[in-house]
Amino acid sequence: MHGACHCGEVSYEAEVDPEKVIVCYCRDCQSMTGGTCHINAVVAAEDFQLLTGTPADYVRLANSGTARTQAFCGACGTHLYARNADGTGAYGVRVPSMDRAADLAPKVLLFTQRRPDWMEHEAEIPHHKEQ
């Protein structure tokens, strides 16, 4: 899977297992996206490679208490991935930054107690194919 930030300054390739796609509704994911959730693909470290650019980053403690590096494009602000700050473990690659994001349906929902109640009735809200 190829991915990049909105402006194209930072790009990457990742070997994505479609069975390892999650939606996270935790408060951190909501605040960093300005939305209801983050959609992440869990990608082994050896299956992720930056192609262009160098992401900006910061470290934040996750709900688990683990220090997590949050990487994003310093030019346009697109969230790209998170991983343990000590460099261990897998990447949580932000699916919306991938070229074929629509091919990756979530398999697990996390922190659903933080999911907005209105989402249960989303099908009843008027839909428009374009703005």
Image (cartoon, helix red, strand yellow):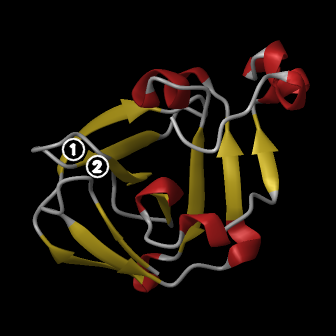
Label 1's element?
strand
Q: Compare residues 68 and 99 and report the one nearer the observer.
A: 99
Tag 2: residue type?
Answer: Ala
Q: Name the residue tied to disc 2.
A: 71
Q: Position of residue 129 (x, y in %)?
A: 63, 44
Q: Quadrant of residue 114?
A: top right
Crowd tier of the residue under label 2, counting other residues whose Cα lies within 10 Å: few below 14, some 14–19, many 20 or above: many
Which residue type does callout 1 highlight?
Asp
- Residue 63 in the image: above or below residue 12: above
Q: Residues within 10 Å of mark 1 (few under 14, many from 20)?
A: some
Residue 69 numbered mark, or none: none
What residue lies at 27% left-to-right and 57% top-to-bottom?
A: 5
Query: Does 38 sit left or right of 1 as displayed?
Result: right
Q: Choose between 71 and 106: the one closer to the eye.
A: 106
**Lower sequence index among marks 2 and 1:** 1
Residue 20 versus residue 109 in the image, above or below: below
Q: Residue at x 43, y 71 (%)?
A: 99
Hey, which quadrant is residue 59 in on the image?
Answer: top left
Q: Is residue 62 above or below residue 102?
A: above
x and y percentages locating residue 52 in the rendered image? 13, 74
The residue to which callout 1 is attached is: 57
Q: Residue 75 falls in which quadrant of the image?
A: top left
